[in-house]
Amino acid sequence: MFRWSLPQAACVLSVFVSLALAYEDDIEVNYSDNYYNEITEGDPQEPTPSTAPCKIPDLTKWDKLFSMLENSQMRENMLLQYADDIVKVEMGSLRGEMLRFVAQYGGSCGAAVETAGRRMSLQLVAKFREVLDRLNPQESKNVAATGNSAGNSNNLEMLLQQLLSATRTQTSRLTKLETSCFSNAGAVMGTGGGMPSTSKMGFEVPQGRGGHRAQDVTSQEVQGALATLRQTKTELEEVLRSSRQRYLPAGCEMALLFPMRSRRIYTSIIPDVPLSLSSFTVCLWAKPTAVLNKTVLYSYGTRRNPYEIQLLLSRTSALFTVGGEAHLVEARGVVNEPEWIHLCGTWSSKQGLASLWADGRKVASTPGVAEGHILPDGGSLQLGQERNGCCPGSPSAGGGSGSGVPGFEGGFEAKLAFPGKMTGVNMWNRVLSDEEISQMALRDGSGCEMRGNMVAWGVTEMVPHGGAQFIN
């Protein structure tokens, strides 16, 4: 068997050797280099130029500064965002604590504030009724009958001032009470204690079996009480303003009312002594309703010269003339309608110096005005108008109107008329001193007691015409 297997193994080995030799002949190994992008020698190619790398310039100090600013801005934005997040969280927690605090202590504080507000309101109502009682028309008639209307007006204004001051004080006290209530309770929350001390706030917090008694008072009711106090304050200010408009300055007890601008409405003055003067002072209080380019307050003229003396208003200016319109003294920006204004005009023939005073101050002065002139007698003196066709009974009187209206004397123009109130009209035959004019112009003084020796307010006869009338 061994002999048979040996030849068999040799046969198999020879077969494997022949197969291996046949497979080796089929494989060709190529050891040459294979270039797919081979460049032929016929077309030489130019080398592709390469660009130089970008050179980064050096940063200047300004570039560095701007970079630092940008970095700081970014940091600031990050910090702000972080702070905002923190604030939101803290505010949320604070809101929760405040809600818990209000739920625990709001009722007692609200009750105390409501009680204080109710007391203040009752006090204000009582004082307000007292003032209204003093404003009773019957009482005003009794006071007028006794001749003390000026003193009563001053007392009334003083009472209104006190009432207004009391309103402001009560409002301030109520605000402080509310602030103190919540601030004291907030301090208790910060310390973790119980109820706040009530001795400092001036009231006792009601308590029940379970501690604090529940209250139905809310912050809206407290705000309502404050609103009521503010409304009362506004009403008192209106009453005070109305009283100031009704009563007269410088202690005057009556005034002349010129209700509208009309050529029929004026007041004539009939002096007791002749007006032949070489110097004089004219003073008056006026409250104009409306002022045009020329509004006449005080006018004296003769047939020869209707413009011997004129005290005029022109918009916001005051004007004073002697001996004709060519001699003019003007002060601008002294008239504020419809406010009371005190005007004085002084003139001396010797120096020819004319001066104009407004509210106790010399506002204009002009030399050489009608120097050496003597004011003639026999003219016409009136308030609120000037007589162009001077004088009564002259052929030129009437201004061509020919109306024949009873009680109307011609020579007047509606556009020159004065609408408003006038009081304290006086005239002296000398130039008053600066101190005398300043004292006369005090609103709260007693200037109406200083009466002129040529024209005296409340003594010299003054005759209203048309709708002009005396009022208290």
Image (cartoon, rainbow, N blue to C red):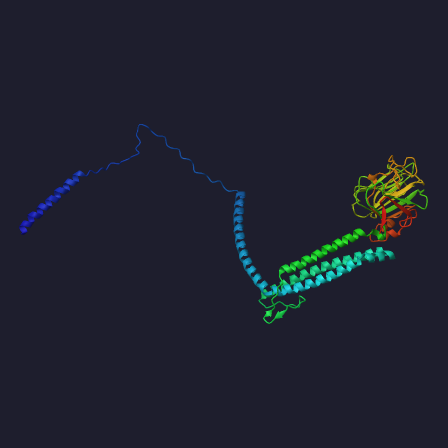
Count of residue discs: 0
Q: Position of residue 41 (x, y in %)?
A: 30, 29
**Position of residue 365 measured from the top left corner of the image (x, y, whole percent):** 85, 42
**Hey, which quadrant is residue 49 in on the image?**
top left
Q: Can you tell which quarter of the image residue 181 is in?
A: bottom right
Please determine whether, in this image, residue 182 is positioned above or below residue 289.
Answer: below
Residue 411 image offset from top left, x and y in percent: 87, 38
Q: Farthest residue toward the bottom? A: 209
**Percent of width and height locating residue 25:** 16, 38
Q: Which of the two residues, 459 or 75, is positioned nearer the viewer here? A: 459
Instruction: Please give the name of the residue rendered at 62% of the width and 60% of the height, measured from the top-left corner.
Output: 219
Q: Is residue 409 above or below residue 441?
A: above
Image vertical order of residue 315 relative to residue 75, above or below: above
Q: Residue at x 68, y 64 (%)?
A: 116
Q: Nearer the viewer, residue 401 or 373?
A: 401
* For residue 108, side relative to residue 150 (left or right): left
User: On the picture, is 352 further left or further right than 117?
Assistant: right
Tell which residue pokes out farthest to the top in this image. Answer: 42
Residue closest to the eye, 143 or 204: 143
